[in-house]
Image (cartoon, helix red, strand yellow):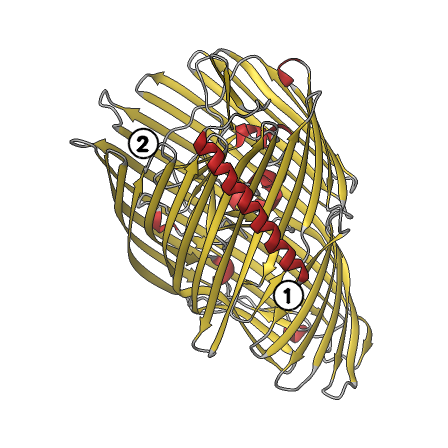
Amino acid sequence: MKRMVKIVMALVALMGSVTSAVAQEATGMDSVAVEWGDTLQLQDVEVVTMRQLVKTMDDRVSYNVQADPEVRTSTVLDMLRKVPLVSVDGQDNVRVNGGGSFKIYKNGHPDPALSSNPREVLRAMPASVVKRIEVITEPGARYDAEGATAILNIVTVESVRIEGVNGTVSASINTFGSPNASAYVAARAGKFTLGATGFYQKQTRRMFASEDETWTTYKDTGTTMYNRYRNEQPAWVYNLNLNASLEIDSLNLITASFGGYRYGMNIYGDSHIEYHDATGQLLTSYDNPFNLPRYGGMTWNGRADWEHRTSRKDEVLTASYMFSTTGQHEEQFDSLINLVNPPFDYTSYNKWGKERFVEHTWQLDYQLPLWGHHLLEVGGKYILRLNKSHNRMNYDGAAELDTDTRFKHVMHVGAAYASWRYKVGDVTLRGGVRYEYSHFRASYPNGDGEPFGRDLHDVVPSASIHWQLSPFNSLRLSWATSLNRPGINYLNPAVKRYTSTIEYGNPHLSSARNNMVSINFQHTGNRLTFNVKPSLTITNNLIGTSRTAHDGIVYLTNSNDCRYMMAGVGGFVQWMMTGKTTLVMNGEVCYKRYRNPSQDLTNSGWGGNLYAQLSQQLPWKLRVTATCMWYGIGHDLNHVYGYSTMPDPTIMLGLSRSFLKDNRLTVRLSANSILHKHQVDKTFVTQGDYVNHGVGRYNQRNVQVSVSYAFGSSNTRVKQTETTVENDDLVGGLRSGN
């Protein structure tokens, strides 16, 4: 409580300072030039403005990555912590608008390499190859039904008409012994441009070592279970992307890309489990050492776009095709030793699984300016998805429990949309509607179940209004709907049996429908920029985890039974306190409510997060930063049964300096988590068939050295078409941000 009082008092003092800054900005008080800002000389008066990091448009909020002073030695994940309406917690889990229902695009189209394993890819991807990060909080009809209540679009730098070669190479290493290397190069010859990016990261044992303790009480018997779990996750990930563009003439552009990533992990650890009856008497105990020697996967995709413009301004026709394939495999060995009255007959078990996802997409988009200030967008899409999985469980000493399940899932999706935009003066109106037909069929090649299928018809409308109140202020009001279809991981009925849990999918899941309304206000000034966005999201048939417990065993599956509501306010502040001192803050506070009528359970509560960075420019091109990240304020609800929290903030210090001509070489030294050696994550299950309390500890304190060098003399970048393929409607599938 005392800490919360201090925080409130500090925020009140900060708001008073912000108010003074607004008054100072309005009265035009003098300021001092900042080295990384934009300086204008007007006679004898020096006027200083910030490089604006945030911009609000009629359907999105944009963060200017290239204007961030830390761009050369940071990763994309580092930048995401600063983006309005985005949060990244201590375990690098990304959220947008307070939830996980979002998709990641690159240059306006979905990138399976980013969506299927975002944490590993984004924390290895160099920020220097990114121009801006867009948060499309209210996707329009062109991709509205595609399943995301928000889209995170990573836009790489584009080409200019300059011959030459340029690029950037970066490397870093921390005291965990984890190296990270990346490279970017682009070259242009005439009308042809080629670009390539690649990175490699090795995650050592110390970097991802964790320890968890949980205490569980089962209501039907009063039995309690204690579980101490430790694991280490040495891993590697590498990524390669090739992009090419050919400007046939001023009206025709062809672009193509190929890329993806591979990752592998060798997870191993152990757990100790004890069961006690209601009186505290020991019932059973055992130890469970385990190893996953083969856990990993890959994603590769190729794309081609043809963009044709006419002599009429803003008339554009785009034809696109995308192919993607994703695979995931795992093999796990568990031993059961030091057995005391075990409730099972086996002494070890082996789990083996393999999944494969293939997708073909064809899309056509047409943009036509109409009379006056009207703009019409129409288009269509066809998607063919082929999913298959194979899972085995084998038990030593209990062969009757062995399972071998094969599952196939084929989906056809056809969609058509129409979107209208009207701009008059300072007001922009948008409206659109999308129709989607989907047909899927599931089967069991080894005869484990009866085939089943379903046809779905969905109409998804959207609308927004954007008002530029003044050169410094804008307001946007929007309403959007979207769908989430269940993927193969949620549908697959294969049973995975462990000593204390049993997991299986639900082949009868249906699509979930999300509705969101929001208001976004932004002020953009010379010394102060801030963004405030209140929003409300409602889902009546949320796809969520269903948990039941019988005789000390927890059964996990998925259902559409849950109703969800979230009301929250997100905000961003960029304030040039002095000519060489800048404060950036990003955070949100929200109220969530989950209700499951079939289980007669309701869970609600408040939670929030805060990111703040204070930077100071020093002599000799030195720059020092102090950063606070706190992603566990209050209660973070993620289901109807309970909540989690991270009670301690993370404090980071950084020092950087640029060298050589044009600051081509940048070196950065950073100390992470200087107050706490471990990140602590607490979870609580407060209702349902059992109650649970867990504490997780993760290694976090480390020191890192980063070096970045830019070479070449041109600004060559690969061009991108304005529209292209975007698929992102699945949850619980290989490519949906697992």
Image position, residue 348 (x, y; %): 75, 68
**Residue shown at the point (55%, 14%) measured from the top left:** 165
Image position, residue 493 (x, y; %): 51, 67
Considering every residue shown, the one lying at the far right of the view is 338
User: Which image quadrant is residue 632 in?
Assistant: bottom right
**Residue shown at the point (55%, 28%) measured from the top left:** 129
Residue 318's label in the rendered image is 2
Which residue corresponds to mark 1? Answer: 683
* Three-letter residue code for mark 2: Thr
Residue 561 sits above or below residue 239 on the image: below
Within 10 angstroms of label 1, few (less than 14), some, or many (20 or more) residues?
some
Residues under numbered marks 2 and 1 in contact, where contact means CB atoms less than 8 Å apart: no
Within 10 angstroms of label 2, few (less than 14), some, or many (20 or more) residues?
many
Image position, residue 410 (x, y; %): 41, 54
Image position, residue 413 (x, y; %): 34, 51
Considering every residue shown, the one lying at the far left of the view is 371
Q: Say left or right for 156 vs 537.
A: right
**Residue shown at the point (28%, 30%) measured from the top left:** 317
Q: Say left or right for 162 vs 35.
A: left
Say which quadrant the N terminus sits in. Answer: bottom right
Instruction: Give the camera-side residue of 703 and 469.
Output: 469
SS at mark 2? Answer: strand
* Three-letter residue code for mark 1: Thr
Residue 664 sits above or below residue 199 on the image: above
Residue 147's label in the rendered image is none
Instruction: Give the camera-side residue of 282 and 151.
Output: 151
The answer to whether one can see residue 339 in this image is: yes
The answer to whether one can see residue 148 in this image is: no
Residue 504 sits above or below residue 263 on the image: below
